[in-house]
Image (spheres, grey):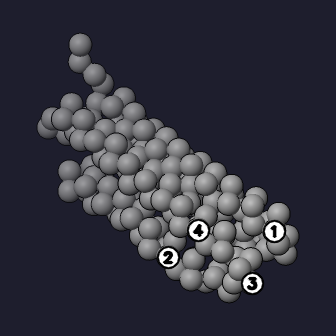
Amino acid sequence: MAFDPTALAILGGAIGLAGGMAGSSIGVGIAASAGAGTLAEEPGQFRNVILLSSLPMTQTFYALIVLILIITTVVPKIAGMPDPGGSGLAVLGCGIFVASTEGFSAAYQGVICASGISLLPKTKGKLLTTTMILAVLVELWGILGIVFSVLTLSLLGLF
């Protein structure tokens, strides 16, 4: 049974988005869980807890951008490729790559944010900037995930 290359490409984009959403959900859940404990100890840290807890959500947007690029730019070009089946599989592989980079990046960003959140009361909120900088280091992998996927699609002649 042959698979439609367009369907494979869209499936790849959907898998990428699902991975980003799953990772963001896990990351926000981990960070917000730490935030609940911090707010019980010091309610004045609410703004900082919300800020740090929301950081892992960005990977969902990166994965959504990849899905939109696949649907609007890649899918119309697949039929004209010399090997459309191979191109569909390549886009599926790209989607799996995006799912893993965005998912892991968001989940581990949540772990970093949770550590910072749990220390906010002890440092009177002075750890906010440092925690954000450390979280941005993990964010870089999510950004590289979208950059490498667009580069791959471009090298395949699909973007």
Identify residue type, mark 3.
Lys
The Cα atoms of the two marked residues, 4 and 3, are separated by 14 Å
Residue at the spot 52% in from the left edge and 80% down from the top edge: 133
Pointer 4 residue: 115
The Cα atoms of the two marked residues, 2 and 1, are separated by 24 Å
Q: Are marks 2 and 4 in contact (CB under 8 Å)?
A: no
Identify residue type, mark 1.
Glu
Q: Earlier in the sequence, mark 2 or mark 1?
A: 1
**Quarter of the image holding residue 10?**
top left
The disc placed on residue 134 is 2
32 lies left or right of 90: right
Q: Are marks 2 and 3 in contact (CB under 8 Å)?
A: no
Whether residue 114 is visible to the viewer of this picture, yes or no, is yes
The residue at the far left in this view is 82
Residue at the spot 66% in from the left edge and 69% down from the top edge: 118
Query: Element type at marker 2?
Result: helix
